[in-house]
Amino acid sequence: MAAWELLAPRRRPSVGRARRWPSNLGIAALNVAIVRVLIPVAAVDIAGLGELQNWGLFNNLAPAFDEYLPWAAIVPSVILLDLAIYLQHVMFHAVPALWRLHRMHHADLDFDVSTGLRFHPGEILISAVIKLAAVVSIGAPPQAVLAFEVVLNATSMFNHSNVRLPAGTDRVLRLFMVTPDMHRVHHSVVRAETNSNFGFNLSWWDRWLGTYRAQPAAGHLGMTIGLEQFRDPADLRLDRMLLQPWRGAAGAYPIGGQ
């Protein structure tokens, strides 16, 4: 995706990679280290344990469909896990305390593949716990969880990329998956646009639940990326990114805020 951005960029960057990427990649490395230490059990591991203990929806259906499970549960499990991530994303925009963590992701002054790695460690930890709970509740088989993890990470890199797709290709793809143009709207400085297009993988949830916005009002080349509160390029430093949840008020961005 990084190479594609260089070959066919959608927008001209306002801040160079040399200014943004060290901090964005640094926060990603820090998140991996923190999660591995504090949450040593992976989602795939908890899915395997749930299978042994008959935890969750699909594991309790196993006696009735023993011949077909876990294979018949893989696709619906991936879809339900994607819905859980969508709802979690909405929650991080609706609850001011969670928005303080999540807004670090939105405070990037440009939108490219590295933005898909830029999440506060506090958000990563909460998200990991929610994901484990979703896996257990659904009773997702390990194969489904592994597939979901691969797809989620791949699509996060794709839909955060500063790449140019033909308009017709984008129009077809976004019928079922989130494209870069669709997700870029979510990173607009305009509050109504920030609180739209919450999906990471499947575009259905935004369309069906009323949070879909087709295009930014200013157009993709004219829109401003980021948040009104954090326009200083100095805020792109790693230390300031980590302290961002405690800097200033939650502001008007949370859903329902004034």
Image (tube, grey):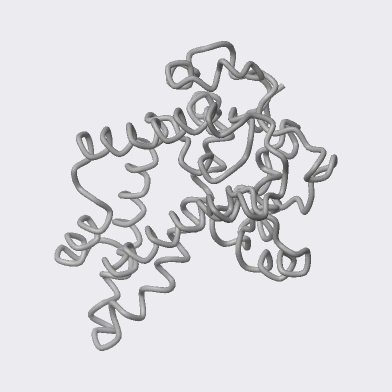
Give percent across and percent down for residue 24. 46, 33
Give percent across and percent down for residue 150. 39, 61
For this view, does 33 lie left or right of residue 2? left
In the image, 190 versus 8, the foreground residue is 8
Q: Residue furthest bottom?
A: 67
The relative height of residue 236 versus residue 152 in the rendered view (above or below) is above
Q: Residue furthest top?
A: 248
Q: Quadrant of residue 120?
A: top left
Name the image quarter holding the C terminus: top right
In the image, 96 versus 240, the foreground residue is 240
In the image, 57 versus 127, the foreground residue is 127
Q: Going 36% across and 80% down the picture, which residue do you hit?
A: 72
Give percent across and percent down for residue 80. 45, 62
The relative height of residue 233 versus residue 38 in the rendered view (above or below) is above
Q: Quadrant of residue 139?
A: bottom left
The relative height of residue 175 versus residue 226 in the rendered view (above or below) is below
For this view, does 244 lie left or right of residue 57? right
Q: Going 70% across and 56% down the picture, which residue do you hit?
A: 164
Q: Going 57% across and 42% down the picture, which residue do you hit?
A: 90
Q: Residue furthest front?
A: 7
